[in-house]
Image (cartoon, helix red, strand yellow):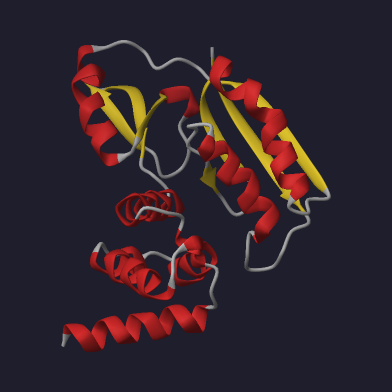
Amino acid sequence: MDVRLEFTVEPFLEGSPGPHVRAAVDEARRQGLAPEMGPFGTTIDGEAARLLPGLGAIVGAAVDAGASRVAFAVSRRQAVPTHPFLTALAPLADALGAQVVPSDDMAPGDVPLAFDGEVLAGIRLPRARGLLDRLIAEVERELGGKLSDLVRDDKQQAVKLLNDRGAFSLRRSVEDVADALGVSRITVYNYLNAVTRRGS
């Protein structure tokens, strides 16, 4: 059964998800899940058998990092209809990191997928935050560790790689990269300036 898991972690911190939120999201990723952080909570879509057993560990990680409250909502997701047109588009959606959603589950911003005048489903493009998370994970794999655990020179290299891949064109990316690196925004700007000077 496909479900959508939504959770919020309190206390809310203005302008930053806070270590208690990041701990919950990091635990979800450690379990092989793909959380999408939004302004009011985090969403994970997938099979109930994969999502639900790990809830205790997500709560534990958040509480250990200082959370005062963790709230969950689980809802059943409708299945995407089977159609050759949608089957043909599935590899493209996967390559884009997008999701095909049932027509009844479409939200503003989803792209309708119509065949012979009938909307069969919609395609939901990845949120900018999800894209940044993927870029950070890719750089962490290349450099062999979490950004926050890297030494200074490797952190500068991480900023260079993220800059080369367009990460800093995304909204709030400097703040999010600073959180991932465990440094201030000013430090990220200094690293970017150093990268720009070396490249000129």
Instruction: Count up the numbered dots.
Output: 0
Name which quarter of the figure residue 152 lies in: bottom left
Q: Is residue 22 visible?
A: yes
Residue displayed at 72% across by 34% down: 72
Q: Nearer the viewer, residue 132 or 195?
A: 195
Percent across and percent down for residue 12 are 74, 59
Percent across and percent down for residue 127 are 43, 49
Q: Is residue 40 visible?
A: no
- Left or right placement of residue 20 versus residue 111 in this view: right
- Left or right placement of residue 2 versus residue 127 in this view: right
Q: Nearer the viewer, residue 84 or 171?
A: 171
Residue displayed at 72% across by 30% down: 56
In the depicted structure, whether residue 54 falls above or below residue 10:
above
Screen quadrant of the C terminus: bottom left
Q: Farthest right residue?
A: 68
Percent across and percent down for residue 54 are 64, 27
Residue displayed at 46% across by 43% down: 108
- Left or right placement of residue 136 versus residue 49 in this view: left
Q: Nearer the viewer, residue 148 or 161?
A: 148
- Left or right placement of residue 86 versus residue 51 in this view: left
Q: Farthest left residue?
A: 200
Percent across and percent down for residue 60 are 74, 39
Residue displayed at 68% across by 33% down: 57
Screen quadrant of the N terminus: top right
In the depicted structure, whether residue 101 falls above or below residue 70:
above
